[in-house]
Image: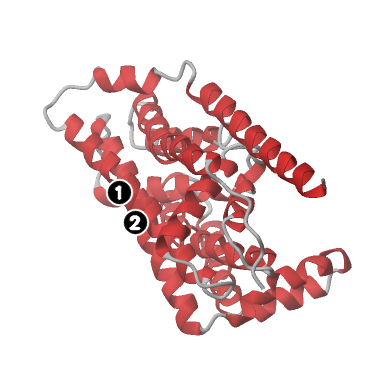
C-alpha cells in the first residue's frame, strides 16, 4: 500500500513539474516576437549566417556544461556522459522556474542513483562557482576598461581604487575555488550555516588537477556563450571595435551573474538593461542590442528548457544503490 502511494506521489510530482514548467515556458515566449521583428528588419546576406552560427553553438554550450558536470559527478558515483548530459537538461528545465535557477540542483540530483546523492550539492556548487569565477575575472577586466573611459573622469584615484578592489575580488575568488577547505572553514564559523557543511564535504575530494580542468571547461563555455552573443549582436547590426565589443559583453555577463533573479523569466531584465547601457556608450541603438540579448536568452534558455521537458517527462523513480 505504501509503495503504491509513494508511486502515485512520484507521478503526481512529475506531472506538476511538467505542467508548471510548460506554463512558464509558454508565458516566457508569449508575445516576445520583438527580436524576430527586429531581425527581419536587418539587411545583408550575412545576417542569417550569424544567427545560424549562434544557434549551432547551443549544443556546444550545453555539451561543455555536461562535460563539466560529468567530471565533477565522478566523486559521487560513476556516471556516463549521456547520463550527465541528460541530468544537465533536466536541471536546466527545472531551473527555469526557480529563483536563481536552484532547480538545477534538484534536476541533477534526481538523475543520480547513489544513496549519498545529496552530496552532489557540493559538486553542483563547485561547477557553478567555477563559472562565476571565470565571469568575475573576464567581467572585471571588461568592466574596469569601460569604467576607466566613461565614468568619473575627474577622479582617477577613485578608479585605481576600484581597480584594486576588483583585483582583490578576483584573487579571493580563485583562492576560494582552489582551496575548498577555506569555504568549509568559513561556513563553520557561522552557526546557521553549519548544517549545510555535510553536503559540501565532497569539495575536499577534488585535486588541484580536477579543479584546473573544471575551470578550463568553464572558460571554454564562457567563450562559447560570449561568441554567441557577439554573433547575434553582429546580426542585429551592432558594430564597435573588438576590445570595446568584448568589454561590453563581459560587463553584461558579470552584472547578470551577480544580481539575484526570481526565475529565468524575470532574469532576462538585468542582461537586457546592462547590454543596452554599455553598448549605448558607443552610440549603438538600444533596440538592436535588446533584440540580440533576447535572442541569446531564447536560444540558450527557452529552447533547451523546452527540450529538457522531454527528459523531465521520462524521469523514473530510481532505487538507491548501496
Residue 205 falls in image quadrant: bottom right
Position in image of residue 223 (x %, y %): 34, 56
Q: Is residue 18 above or below residue 252?
A: above
Considering depth in this image, is 20 or 310 the residue closer to the camera? 310
Residue at coordinates 53% horizontally, 59% vertically from top-left?
A: 132
The residue that mark 1 highlights is: 227
Considering depth in this image, is 11 or 98 the residue closer to the camera? 11
Position in image of residue 227 (x %, y %): 30, 49
Position in image of residue 116 (x %, y %): 68, 69
Left or right? Give the position of 38 relative to 169. left
Provide the secondary structure element on which disc 1 rests: helix
Left or right? Give the position of 295 relative to 14. left
Residue at coordinates 64% horizontally, 75% vertically from top-left?
A: 202
What label sits on residue 48 in the rendered view? none
Position in image of residue 57 (x %, y %): 29, 47
Left or right? Give the position of 143 relative to 95. left
Let me know if residue 31 appears in the view.
yes
Q: Is residue 40 above or below residue 205?
A: above
Do the numbered discs 1 and 2 sit on residues whose CB atoms are within 8 Å?
yes
**Residue furthest front as drawn:** 1
Residue at coordinates 44% horizontally, 55% vertically from top-left?
A: 85
The residue that mark 2 highlights is: 223
**Residue furthest right as drawn:** 191
Let me know if residue 246 appears in the view.
no
Residue at coordinates 45% horizontally, 65% vertically from top-left?
A: 68
Q: How many neighbours does mark 1 have within 10 angstroms: few (below 14), some (14-19), or many (20 or more)? A: some
Amino acid at each position: 500500500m505504501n509503495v503504491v502511494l509513494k508511486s502515485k506521489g512520484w507521478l503526481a510530482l512529475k506531472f506538476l513539474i511538467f505542467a508548471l514548467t510548460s506554463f512558464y515556458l509558454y508565458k516566457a515566449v508569449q508575445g516576445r516576437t520583438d527580436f524576430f521583428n527586429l531581425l527581419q528588419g536587418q539587411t545583408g546576406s550575412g545576417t542569417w549566417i550569424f544567427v545560424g552560427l549562434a544557434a549551432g553553438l547551443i549544443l556546444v554550450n550545453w555539451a561543455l556544461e555536461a562535460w563539466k558536470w560529468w567530471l565533477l559527478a565522478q566523486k559521487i558515483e560513476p556516471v556516463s556522459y549521456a547520463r550527465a548530459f541528460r541530468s544537465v537538461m533536466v536541471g536546466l528545465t527545472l531551473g527555469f522556474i526557480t529563483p536563481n535557477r536552484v532547480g538545477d540542483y534538484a534536476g541533477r540530483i534526481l538523475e543520480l542513483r547513489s544513496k549519498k546523492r545529496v552530496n552532489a550539492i557540493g559538486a553542483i556548487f563547485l561547477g557553478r562557482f567555477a563559472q562565476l569565477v571565470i565571469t568575475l575575472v573576464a567581467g572585471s577586466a571588461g568592466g574596469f576598461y569601460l569604467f576607466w573611459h566613461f565614468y568619473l573622469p575627474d577622479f582617477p584615484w577613485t578608479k585605481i581604487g576600484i581597480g584594486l578592489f576588483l583585483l582583490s575580488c578576483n584573487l579571493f575568488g580563485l583562492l576560494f575555488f582552489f582551496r575548498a577547505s577555506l569555504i568549509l572553514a568559513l561556513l563553520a564559523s557561522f552557526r546557521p550555516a553549519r548544517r549545510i557543511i555535510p553536503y559540501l564535504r565532497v569539495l575536499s575530494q577534488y585535486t588541484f588537477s580536477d579543479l584546473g580542468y573544471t575551470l578550463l571547461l568553464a572558460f571554454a563555455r564562457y567563450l562559447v556563450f560570449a561568441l554567441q552573443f557577439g554573433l547575434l549582436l553582429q546580426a542585429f547590426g551592432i558594430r564597435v571595435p573588438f576590445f570595446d565589443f568584448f568589454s561590453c559583453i563581459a560587463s553584461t555577463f558579470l552584472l547578470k551573474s551577480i544580481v539575484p533573479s526570481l526565475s529565468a523569466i524575470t532574469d532576462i531584465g538585468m542582461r537586457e538593461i546592462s547590454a543596452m547601457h554599455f553598448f549605448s556608450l558607443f552610440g549603438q541603438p538600444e533596440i538592436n542590442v535588446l533584440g540580440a540579448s533576447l535572442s541569446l536568452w531564447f536560444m540558450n534558455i527557452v529552447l533547451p528548457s523546452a527540450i529538457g521537458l522531454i527528459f523531465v517527462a521520462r524521469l523514473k523513480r530510481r532505487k538507491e544503490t548501496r
